[in-house]
Image (tube, rainbow, N blue to C red):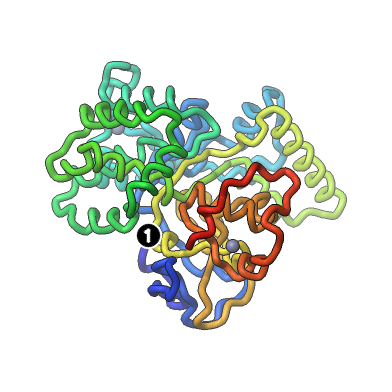
Amino acid sequence: MAALLADCVEVRNTDSKKGRGLFAKSHIQKDQVIFKEAPLVSCQFAWNEFYKYTACEHCLRSLEPAEAMARRLTENPCLVLPHPECCGVRQDLIVNCPNCGMIYCSVECYQSAIEKYHKCLCIGSSRDDTDHPINKVIESWRNIHYPPESANIMLLLKMIAMVKQSDDPMPLLNDFSRFVQTTVNEEEQAIHKLLSHQEHLELMRSLVTESMYDDKVKQWFTGDGFRSMFALMGTNQQGIGSSSISVWVKNCEKLPLPGEEKQQLDQFIDQLYEDLEKVSDTFLNCEGVGLYKAQSSCNHSCAPNAEIQFLNENHTLSLVALEDIEPEQEVCISYLDACEIDRSRHTRQKILKENYLFTCNCPKCISQADDEDVTSEDEDDDDDEDMEES
Ligand SMILES: [Zn+2]
Ligand SMILES: [Zn+2]
Ligand SMILES: [Zn+2]
């Protein structure tokens, strides 16, 4: 999707320890889509798929009709959504892999999957065969990584499959190598976030080797190599979410309705979200992760001037400006979620250090550097002297 990368930004080395950064080349307006980007590789979470959040295997587009999804997640089989024409799921375009039954939103997505990795990962009629080596990887992963999910070993399987299927894997390997961690210590921390027990890593390595081994990337199957690849998932992956219900809501909001009808529809939608949250809590979306080349150059700031959105309703992300950005200014997003970003500098830095392995020196953090170290009442004990070293 490089063609969609805008002329208004470029990747440059920064003067600080952050390495690369994304910089504006021309004036960018608030709300402007700076670029759109499809991932190098993406996958749905294992439990998310298991619990029937139906999404395109390739692009993660939500494929369960909005009404069916709303019925399932509110546990109300009689629920009827008004304006069914606002449901964006195109059932007439959906195709299944003729060999394994895997679902795709379109022929294009199916073909893309086949070309890139699915030839290698298609398990044909063995979908229910628990002894199939690929099924063993997926099931074992589910048994060591419970919701709320933050990774899926399938991302690694797809990366291996892409290399296997490629005639010339060098460009692909170069792309992947951009994401690799630098120090053993950082790898340890990244892995610790995904797995509670060290021996699970060895279990995964043996199962992945059994199902996918390939000479072209034999370094990925060694103890150290597998550890690096696994750590790569922990720190570089971007979360992806899609939902046919939110597409339906967005389309409803665009309907040209008379005042009273509009008000009724708004009330219906408010009530729907209340019911959804009551029954399904925060598990409302098809969810997964991906690795993105351009987005990975975008550094964090606690006062970001851009954010990631999924305007295409699939795994293609949009980088959207939150304010006007002038030439030469760095474009930054927040790696923290909406709640985390309002915490004290101390707490933010702790979360960033633990999850993304860096100490934040953004303007907001610098301006708060003289604040008391502990400013949130619900602060944990501090042992973060080591945080401040860089
Ligand atoms: Zn698709
Ligand atoms: Zn298949
Ligand atoms: Zn900061």
Q: Relative to 198, does residue 341 appear above or below in the rendering?
A: below
Q: Amino acid at mark 1?
A: Lys
On the image, the x and y values in percent for residue 357 come to 46, 52
Q: Is residue 50 left or right of residue 383?
A: left
On the image, the x and y values in percent for residue 358 come to 48, 57
Q: Quadrant of ligand 2?
A: top left
Q: Relative to 383, does residue 146 appear above or below in the rendering?
A: above
* Residue sitting nearer the eye, 366 or 336: 366
**Quadrant of residue 380 in the image?**
top right
On the image, the x and y values in percent for residue 6 come to 44, 73
Residue positioned 45% across, 30% down in the render: 196
Q: Secondary structure at mark 1?
A: loop
Q: Relative to 99, does residue 241 appear above or below in the rendering?
A: below
Can the viewer see residue 265? yes
* Residue sitting nearer the eye, 72 or 6: 6
**Quadrant of residue 373 in the image?**
bottom right
On the image, the x and y values in percent for residue 311 come to 55, 56
Q: Is residue 100 left or right of residue 285?
A: left
Residue positioned 49% across, 33% down in the render: 54
In which quadrant of the rendered image does the N terminus lie? bottom left
| Label 1 sits on residue | 293
